[in-house]
Structures are given as C-alpha cells and as structure tokens.
Amino acid sequence: MTASTATLRYTSSRAADNAVRIARVAAGGRVAAQRVAAEAAKAAQHAHATTVAVEWIEDLRAAGAVTVGFKICDDMGKHRFRTTTQDAIGVLAHHWGGDVEAWGIDAAGEFVGEGW
C-alpha cells in the first residue's frame, strides 16, 4: 500500500487578504491624485499657451495678417497649411512645445509680422 500525501500550496488568511485590499485602495487613491495633478498641469499649460498665442496673433493682425501659414513637424511627418488668424490660436495652443513654424500672411500673400 502506498501512502499519498496532499500538499496545500495556497493558503489564505483574513489578515493577509485585508492587507491586500487596503493596499489596493491606497494605491488607487494615489493614482487618482496623480491623474488629477497631471490634468491640472496640462490645463495650466494649455491656458498659458493660449494666452501667448492670442498675444502673438494680435500682433500679426496689427501688422495686417489675415491668415497664418504653418509648418509643423511631428511623428507623422511634415505638415504645411494655412488657417485664419482665429483658428491659428487653437493650432498654436495644441502644438505648444512642438516643432512649429508660423508666420502671418496679408491679403496680398506677403509675409508680415514676426515669425513664431
């Protein structure tokens, strides 16, 4: 006759389970706090970028610009396009910190004002 033995590999205790639950809740709180802080920093950066872009666009309008030409380089390649001066504010704020060149263009198609 052969004796067989069973080995209990996985054991659980309420204290260990509760410790894991508490750690998960604490980690969830830290992650949520980090997410809120990151969103606040992103919103502050966007507000700053919009303010700077509005000031630059106002200077271009004073110089006679009616459109803004862009050259933007990113992971998808190089993009060249023109927008109205009002739409240019959003483009500049969205691409803040990236590789962006922009310049004002008057009604005759001439470059005006300072470049970005």
Image (tube, rainbow, N blue to C red):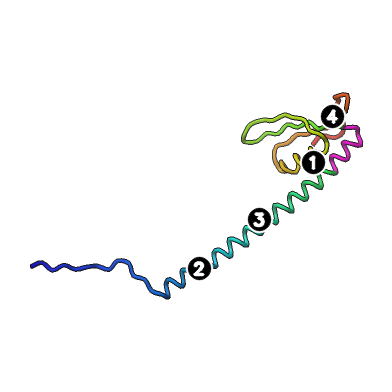
Q: How crowded is mark 2: few (under 14 residues within 10 Å), some or many (20 or more)?
A: few
Whole-number angstrom distance, CA of label 2 to CA of label 4: 58 Å
Magenta-drawn stretch, dominant element (helix, strand or loop): helix
Judged from the image, the secondary structure of the residue bearing numbered disc 1 is helix
Whole-number angstrom distance, CA of label 3 to CA of label 2: 22 Å
Q: Is residue 9 above or below residue 103?
A: below
Instruction: Give me the disc on residue 89.
Output: 1
Residue lying at 79% horizontally and 37% vertically, measured from the top left: 116
Whole-number angstrom distance, CA of label 3 to CA of label 1: 23 Å
Residue 36 is one of the magenta-drawn residues: no
Whole-number angstrom distance, CA of label 3 to CA of label 4: 36 Å
Residue lying at 62% horizontally and 59% vertically, measured from the top left: 34
- The residue identified by callout 3 is 38
Residue lying at 42% horizontally and 72% vertically, measured from the top left: 16
Q: What residue type is labelled 2?
A: Ala
Q: Residues within 10 Å of mark 3 (few under 14, many from 20)?
A: few
Instruction: Give me the disc on residue 105.
Output: 4
- The residue identified by callout 2 is 23
The disc, 3 or 2, on the residue closer to the chain's N-terminal end is 2
Q: Which amino acid does label 3 sit on?
A: Ala
Q: Which amino acid does label 1 sit on?
A: Ile
The disc, 3 or 4, on the residue closer to the chain's N-terminal end is 3
Q: What residue type is labelled 4?
A: Ile
Can you give x and y, in whole percent of width and height, for residue 77 in the image?
64, 31
Span of residues in magenta = 55-65
